């Protein structure tokens, strides 16, 4: 359950319908999930059958100024999985059937100034499917997993989703992993465009071909990945070096375009290129006994084709770096300090705004430091003291046109950094262990 309220101090929810000088928001979310797993292991080695069932209910009631968004999702997911071996234990497989049913009901209203948008979006998705996965393993040196699933969407037809994973130990301390696959989904533009509701931007769907799923096509993407992990020993202490390279490219994507007009968000199907490339390098090492360090750097290149051309994804850093220091004593004291650096982020264009409401083309880079000290007794009781954003960095003037929250240029969604300064916290935790008998009963 989530129950958030915010806005100006002068805002009164009871007077919202007639209040135009104070801005407020509310977000109430109730979510219930019921999960069941059943299985039976056969006397034959490596053979079993099982089933999984998930029931989901999600209800969201919210408003942002003069905008209302209420949504409900009811979902069912069920599958049956059979696992066995082919000939010998080097060859294994999994196969089964699955079914997914989702029922969405959304209400969106925008009564800002002269707008009178009041729309209900309803859709149900029924997707039966089947899958098969083959695994080949050779000791601990080589593993190949290849699989395909076929889903029959009741509105968009058949989706075929292949995937491939390969793990190869070049040497006892050196491992390479490769992956590739395809994925698809239906975009929920209102729930996913939630942040932009904290603005005066008008939501507009372009190129709608039907009333189903906002009139937009499913998103389809291909993913590729490479991981290299090297374990090393330096000065009698173990360390790890890893590199990850990933690429995702969309054959179709639902684009949320905030570039054309600072008073609008446009939603439409991709017409051009959209991709994400990432590179991450990480080193873990124990400098001295019980004193560990982790260093990481990540490079992002995320671009999408908008109506105005191909651009970097807004509010996303191209470069990030991370340092973590952790020290623990024999008397169960734990000291942790983390320093994050986020590079500059491109900001959505505000060229068409009046000069006083324009922003820079990109944000500055900044550091965030967090630290925590904790003490544990008998692995049962723990106290801790810590601080977030120790350097007290804050985004200045985070809200555009904050003095006129119902004007057409008001925008509280252009957040690229912390809006709160240094925060100190303290607390305690009690850890309870439940003893189980040999049959797993508590």
Image (tube, grey):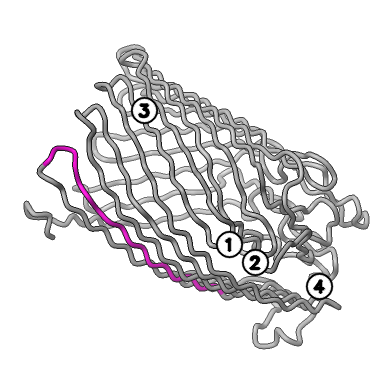
- The crowding category of the residue bearing disc 2, from other C-alpha atoms within 10 Å (few below 14, some 14 to 19, many at least 20), is some
Label 4 vs 3, first from the N-terminus: 3
Q: Quadrant of residue 289?
A: top left
Circles 1 and 2: CB distance less than 8 Å?
yes
Q: Which residue in the structure is indicated by mark 4?
A: 406
- Camera-near label (1 vs 2) is 1
Q: CA distance from mark 1 to mark 2?
A: 9 Å
Q: Which residue in the structure is indicated by mark 2?
A: 212
Label 4 vs 2, first from the N-terminus: 2
Q: CA distance from mark 4 to mark 2?
A: 31 Å
Q: Which residues are magenta?
A: 44-60
Disc number placed over residue 354 in the picture, else none: none
- 52 drawn magenta: yes
Q: Is residue 396 left or right of residue 222?
A: right
Which of the two residues, 353 or 332, is positioned nearer the viewer here?
353
- Camera-near label (4 vs 2) is 2
Residue in the image at 62% along x and 47% along y: 392
What is the number of callouts on the image? Answer: 4
Reply above or below: 110 against 191.
Answer: below
Q: Which residue in the structure is indicated by mark 1?
A: 155
């Amino acid at each position: 359950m989530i129950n958030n309220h915010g806005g100006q101090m002068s805002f009164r929810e009871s007077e919202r319908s007639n209040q135009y000088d104070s801005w407020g928001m509310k977000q109430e979310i109730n979510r219930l999930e019921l999960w069941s797993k059943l299985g039976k292991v056969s006397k034959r080695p490596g053979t079993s059958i099982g089933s999984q069932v998930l029931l989901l209910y999600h209800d969201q009631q919210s408003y942002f100024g003069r905008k209302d968004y209420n949504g409900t999702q009811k979902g069912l997911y069920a599958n049956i999985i059979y696992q066995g071996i082919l000939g010998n234990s080097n060859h294994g497989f999994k196969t089964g059937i699955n079914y997914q049913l989702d029922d969405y009901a959304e209400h969106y209203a925008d009564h800002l100034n002269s707008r009178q948008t009041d729309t209900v979006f309803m859709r149900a998705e029924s997707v039966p499917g089947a899958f098969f996965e083959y695994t080949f393993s050779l000791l601990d040196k080589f593993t190949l997993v290849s699989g395909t699933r076929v889903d029959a969407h009741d509105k968009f037809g058949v989706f075929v989703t292949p995937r491939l994973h390969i793990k190869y130990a070049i040497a006892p301390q050196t491992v390479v992993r490769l992956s590739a696959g395809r994925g698809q989904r239906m975009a929920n533009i209102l729930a996913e465009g939630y942040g932009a509701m904290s603005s005066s931007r008008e939501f507009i769907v372009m190129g709608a071909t039907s009333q189903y799923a906002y009139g937009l096509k499913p998103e389809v993407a291909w993913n590729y990945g490479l991981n290299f992990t090297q374990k090393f020993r330096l000065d009698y202490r173990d360390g790890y070096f890893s590199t990850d390279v990933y690429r995702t490219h969309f054959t179709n994507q639902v684009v949320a375009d905030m570039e054309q007009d600072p008073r609008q968000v446009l939603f439409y199907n991709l017409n051009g290129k959209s991709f994400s490339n990432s590179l991450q390098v990480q080193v873990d090492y124990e400098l001295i006994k019980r004193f560990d360090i982790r260093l990481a750097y990540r490079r992002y290149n995320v671009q999408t084709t908008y109506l105005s051309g191909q651009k970097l994804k807004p509010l996303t850093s191209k470069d990030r770096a991370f340092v973590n220091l952790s020290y623990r004593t024999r008397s169960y004291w734990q000291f942790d300090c983390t320093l994050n650096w986020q590079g500059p982020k491109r900001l959505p264009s505000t060229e068409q705004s009046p000069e006083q409401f324009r922003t820079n083309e990109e944000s500055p880079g900044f550091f965030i430091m967090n630290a925590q000290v904790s003490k544990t007794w008998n692995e049962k009781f723990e106290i801790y003291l810590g601080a977030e954003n120790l350097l007290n960095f804050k985004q200045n003037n985070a809200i555009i046109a904050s003095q006129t929250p119902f004007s057409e240029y008001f925008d509280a969604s252009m957040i690229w950094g912390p809006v709160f300064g240094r925060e100190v916290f303290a607390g305690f935790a009690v850890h309870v262990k439940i003893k189980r008998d040999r049959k797993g009963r508590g």
